[in-house]
């Protein structure tokens, strides 16, 4: 999703849309992972506007102030993928965005944050809201960017933390043997 | 994978074999214990073979790889029916069953817990019954199971070193005056039995890449196969158990991976499909002679479903914890596990550290939640410690597995419905456990404390329970069904009551004992 320069594909697409952005936190844990500060996520079916509304909507459902839009964009990507395999999902999302825009008198994104929050709260429990919430609770937190942000080491653990900090907590007393067992080989 | 090669295969009409349904804690152990005696067994396992190199260090993909995801329905007042209506349990469909992703806690049931009807008296709305077997009878088998599984702090095996999550629990336990150590775990603290020591990966729930944790997948099953007396058939989903005019089991029918139906004859059939599939199979095997399902003259098949009183407490701290590093269940407190009426409920509970990776934390912290309270907790993930609370729940006749005749699985078989209402005793115990767990973390300076509701059931028990009298249950103290002498129950479905402890050590001990009994019966030609 990171590109330098922005992939031409993003702009040459005939259908669907693209979410593009620049990392907000230049020194954040995600920036450390990223080859460049610009990012782009393309969608097959959702338009750019739909993608942007869904991204903002997700930010209100799961508000993490310091979490990059780049991670929220992965939720849009996930929704787009679901829409691609299930026409009902596409209709649900498309109608939902249209309704939000209509209620906002044209463009939901033009509302201020408090107004958007109120409209998200109002949507809570609806099929549209539930689709976004139940998708986001998986896709927002199950990717390497989120892992870096929240401080979970994911696959790094595959080879074991025995010599990589499984017991490096020092702000509490060390339980010691016998309550804790011996470290093998030490 | 030479380890899993069948050195011997048996024909479909070989009626001298013992057919075992399921290759998890019960089935896998039974298979090996019988094969070691030279008894020929055919293990039919619905899942595919996924061995250590195939395991994934990523929670959702691993979940898709190993879990039993066939459709199920739920009803009752338990929160699972609302949060996970089609996923009442969190168990596996893979060779090795749920021992591929269990945590390894291996505790013996306490002596009084085998006789709770006697100790607790009659509790309204609970179908309490004493086990037909006592602690002293099972003790030698517990010892053999502990040796087989390499349980820490038994057989001179050292305890595991405690991780960060353990340190937090331990510090809190000190403040509350609880004893706390790294527990009895079926995880190698040092290389043993041809398997390495634990590398503190923290993916115990996703399958142990190193094989440090005991699983029938790479212990019992290969050991059985190498004898030349066992054959393992994977992707073999048993549809029905069949019987003859005398009411004796004659074999089973099963679907292979292409959906083709086969019939395997048998001298004896042992069911170990875990406590939802086992009763479902007996119910799905109803015939003209047994219209209510096999071994169901008592009407108890599928009833008394237990899933343990559970809940979790997670807490956040100013300083980092990184609870996900190292063994998932890293410390145990048994101080509340006894029976003490003064707490306002019968039975007791264990407190065991637990950690979830970020993806599962999001899914299970507060299912359905959104907004700032939820994200505030997730923001503190790296500073979080956690424990699981697991205690005795009450058997109730109305908590049961039934067939949902409206919905069929991929083979056209009626799917199971799982009904569960919490008993007031479960609720009182959960409240107490939440309280104590919260106090423990508060004593170490917790910032926020979260009471996390039960996950889909990992411990599933009681649906074909043991009883002294045939009218009270489905099988006797050896797991032999009261109605059909050559049909055995070999998994946690046998449990008469749940006890507070994690069940697997007991399932394995019962399977070892059952194997001895079956061997004896076959020699005497009683079956
Ligand atoms: C996340 C998690 C953590 C756990 N941690 C612990 C712990 O620390 N300590 C503890 O004691 N327990 C723990 N458990 C529970 C433990 O895994 C189970 O108690 C144990 O594995 C149950 O053994 P079983 O033989 O009854 O069933 P399983 O091990 O579930 O095996 C049943 C097998 O039967 C197969 N099967 C089912 N139906 C059919 C059919 N019709 N035909 C063919 N095959 C079939 C299934 O595919 C499965 O492989 C944990 C469970 C989970 C999910
Ligand atoms: S922590 Fe130990 S037991 Fe658990 S997966 Fe890792 S090596 Fe295996």
Image (cartoon, helix red, strand yellow):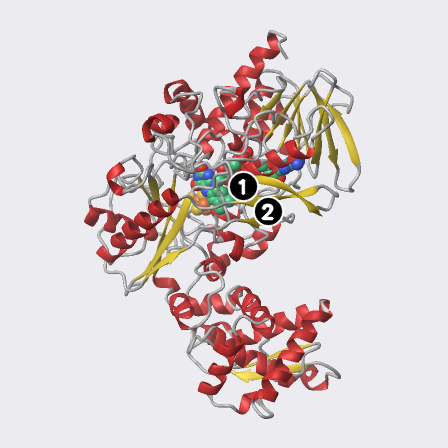
Can marks 1 and 2 be said to lie on one chain? yes
Relative height, residue B433 to residue B320 (above, below): above
- What residue would you read off at disc 2? B66
Q: Position of residue A136 (x, y in %)?
A: 54, 69
Query: From where the camera sits, is residue B1 visible?
Result: no
Circle 1 residue: B100
Mark 2 is surrounded, within 10 Å at the Cα level, by few (under 14), some (14 to 19) or many (20 or more) other residues, namely many
* Nearer to the camera, B108 or B367: B367
Residue B289 % position (x, y):
71, 23
Q: Say left or right for A135 vs B383.
A: right
- Considering every residue shown, the one lying at the far top of the view is B524
Q: Counting other residues with Cα less than 10 Å from the Cα at mark 1, is it few (<14), some (14-19), or many (20 or more)?
A: many
Q: How many marks?
A: 2
The C terminus of chain B - image quarter: top right
Question: Taking the image as four quarters, which one is ligand 1 found in?
Answer: top right
Residue A158 is tagged as none
Name the residue located 59 percent from the left edge and 47 percent from the top edge: B67
């Amino acid at each position: 999703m990171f590109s330098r320069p922005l992939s031409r594909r993003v702009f040459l697409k005939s259908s669907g849309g693209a979410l593009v952005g620049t990392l907000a936190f230049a020194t954040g844990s995600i920036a450390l992972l990223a080859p460049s500060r610009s990012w782009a996520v393309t969608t097959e079916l959702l338009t750019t506007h739909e993608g942007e509304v869904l991204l903002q909507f997700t930010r209100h459902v799961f508000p993490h102030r310091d979490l990059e839009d780049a991670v929220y964009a992965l939720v849009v990507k996930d929704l787009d993928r679901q829409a691609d395999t299930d026409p009902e999902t596409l209709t649900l999302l498309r109608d939902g965005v249209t309704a939000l825009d209509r209620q906002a008198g044209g463009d939901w994104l033009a509302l201020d944050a408090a107004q958007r929050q109120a409209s998200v709260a109002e949507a809570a429990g609806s099929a549209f809201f539930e689709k976004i919430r139940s998708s986001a609770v998986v896709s927002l937190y199950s990717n390497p960017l989120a892992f870096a942000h929240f401080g979970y080491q994911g696959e790094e653990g595959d080879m074991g933390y025995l010599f990589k900090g499984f017991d490096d907590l020092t702000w509490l007393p060390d339980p010691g043997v016998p309550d804790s067992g011996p470290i093998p080989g030490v | 994978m030479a380890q899993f090669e069948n050195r011997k295969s048996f024909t479909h009409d070989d009626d001298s074999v013992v057919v075992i349904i399921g290759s998890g804690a019960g089935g896998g152990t039974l298979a090996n214990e019988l094969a070691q005696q030279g008894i020929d067994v055919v293990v039919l396992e619905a899942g595919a073979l996924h061995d250590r190199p195939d395991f994934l260090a990523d929670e959702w993909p691993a979940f898709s790889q190993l879990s039993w995801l066939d459709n199920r329905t739920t009803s009752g007042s338990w929160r699972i029916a609302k949060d996970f209506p089609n996923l009442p349990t969190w168990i596996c469909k893979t060779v090795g069953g749920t021992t591929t992703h269990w945590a390894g806690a291996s505790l013996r049931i306490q002596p009084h817990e085998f006789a709770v009807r006697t100790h607790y008296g009659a509790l309204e709305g609970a179908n309490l019954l004493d086990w037909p077997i006592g602690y002293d009878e099972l003790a030698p088998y517990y010892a053999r199971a502990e040796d087989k599984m390499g349980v820490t702090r038994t057989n001179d095996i050292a305890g595991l070193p405690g991780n960060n999550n353990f340190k937090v629990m331990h510090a809190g336990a000190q403040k509350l005056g609880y004893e706390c150590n790294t527990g009895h775990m079926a995880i190698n603290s040092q290389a043993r039995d041809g398997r390495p020591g634990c590398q503190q990966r923290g993916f115990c729930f996703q399958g142990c890449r190193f094989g440090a944790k005991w699983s029938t997948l790479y212990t019992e099953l290969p050991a059985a196969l190498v004898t030349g007396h066992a054959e393992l058939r994977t992707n073999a989903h048993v549809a029905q158990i069949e019987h003859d005019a005398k009411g004796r089991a004659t074999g089973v029918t099963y679907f292979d991976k292409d959906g083709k139906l086969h019939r395997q004859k048998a001298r004896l059939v042992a069911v170990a499909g875990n406590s939802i599939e086992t009763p479902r199979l007996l119910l799905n095997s109803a015939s003209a002679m047994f219209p209510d399902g096999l071994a169901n003259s008592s009407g108890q098949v599928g009833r008394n479903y237990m899933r343990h009183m559970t809940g979790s407490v997670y807490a956040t701290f100013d300083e980092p914890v990184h609870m996900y590093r190292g063994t998932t269940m890293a410390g145990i407190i048994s101080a509340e596990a006894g029976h003490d009426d003064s707490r306002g409920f019968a039975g007791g509970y264990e407190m065991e550290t637990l950690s979830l990776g970020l993806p599962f934390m999001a899914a299970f912290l507060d299912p359905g939640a959104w907004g700032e309270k939820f994200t505030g907790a997730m923001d503190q993930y790296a500073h979080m410690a956690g424990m699981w609370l697991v205690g005795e729940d009450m058997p109730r006749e109305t908590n049961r597995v039934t067939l949902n005749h409206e919905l069929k699985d991929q083979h056209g078989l009626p799917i199971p419905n799982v009904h569960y209402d919490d008993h007031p005793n479960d609720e009182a115990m959960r409240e107490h456990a939440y309280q104590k767990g919260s106090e423990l973390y508060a004593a170490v300076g917790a910032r926020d404390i979260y009471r996390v509701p039960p996950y889909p059931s990992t411990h599933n028990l009681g649906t074909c329970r043991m009883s002294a009298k045939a009218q009270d249950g489905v099988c006797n103290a050896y797991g032999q069904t009261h109605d059909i002498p050559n049909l055995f129950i070999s998994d946690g479905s046998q449990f008469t009551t749940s006890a507070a402890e994690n069940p697997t050590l007991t399932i394995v001990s019962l399977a070892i004992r059952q194997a001895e009994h079956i061997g004896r019966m076959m020699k005497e030609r009683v079956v």
